[in-house]
Image (cartoon, rainbow, N blue to C red):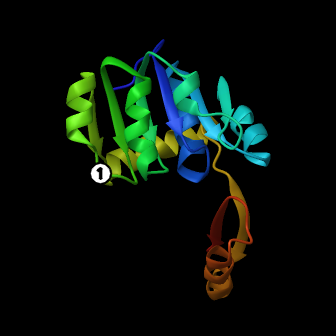
Amino acid sequence: NLQSGQKIFIHGAGGIGSVAIQIAKNLGAYVATTATGEGLKTAKEFGADEVIDYKVQDFAEVLRDYDAVFDTVGRDDFTKSLGVLKRGGAAVSMAAQPDEKKANELGVSAVHQFTKVTTEKLDKLRELVESDAVKPQVGKIFPLDQAREAFEARESGSVQGKIALKIR
C-alpha cells in the first residue's frame, strides 16, 4: 500500500531489493536502502534516493520516521529495522519472522511476506518491465541446453545479478 510521497527503507539492494527500489520509485516514494561495494553505485542507478554502506554506517542511526520497511536480509536486522518506522508504519520481511512484541511497543505492524504469485501480479510486473520502469539486473544469460551450467554458476556465486535461461 505504498503511496506517492511516502518514505520506504528497502533493506538490501540486491536482486529482489533492486526491483523493489524501482517499483517504489515508480510509485513516487522516497527510497533509502543498504548496500556495499559496487552495490552502492548500482542502488543509485536503480533510483535509490539514499544509499547507506552497511559496512560503514548503521542504518538504525541514520534513518527515522519512515512509513514502510521492506526487508530482504532478515536476521536481527528486521527487528532493528522496526526502529526506523514512525508510529503506524509497516514492515514486511521476506527473510525473517516479525518480533510482534517489539512491533507493538513501537506502534508499528510487522509481517513475514509469503509471495502469492497470480497472473494479475505477474502481468503488472511485466508491464513495468516492458515500460522500462523496472529493469531487471541480469548478470548472465545461458542457452536452455546449458541449464546445468546456469545452476552451477548460481550456486558458486560467480555471477553478479540474476541468471536467465534463453529458451529460443
For the point 21% across and 39% down, which residue is it?
Answer: 100
Residue 168 in sight in this render: no
Q: Which residue is nearer to you in this view: 72 or 45?
A: 72
Position of residue 45 in the picture relative to residue 88 (left or right): right
> How many labels were placed on the picture?
1
Residue 132 quadrant: top right
| Viewer can see residue 79 | yes
Residue depicted at x 43% and y 51%:
74
Percent of width and height locating residue 20: 52, 39
Residue for badge 1: 97
Q: Is residue 163 above or below residue 132?
A: below
* Residue type for callout 1: Gln
Residue at left offset 72%, top offset 45%: 36
Q: Quadrant of residue 66?
A: top left
The correct choice, above or below, for 142 with respect to 37 in the image is below
The image quadrant of residue 35 is top right
Task: Determine whether the residue tagged by mark 1 lies in a helix, strand or loop.
Answer: loop
Please state which of residues 77 and 40 is positioned toward the viewer in this rendering: 77
Lateral position of residue 20 relative to residue 141, left or right: left
Q: Nearer the viewer, residue 54 or 138?
A: 54
Q: In the image, 86: left or right of 109? A: right
Query: x, y (%) of residue 138?
Result: 69, 57
Binning the other alpha carbons within 10 Å of mark 1 as few (below 14), some (14 to 19) or many (20 upward) gives some
Horizontal side of residue 136 vs 116, given as left or right: right
| 44 shown above or below 76 | above
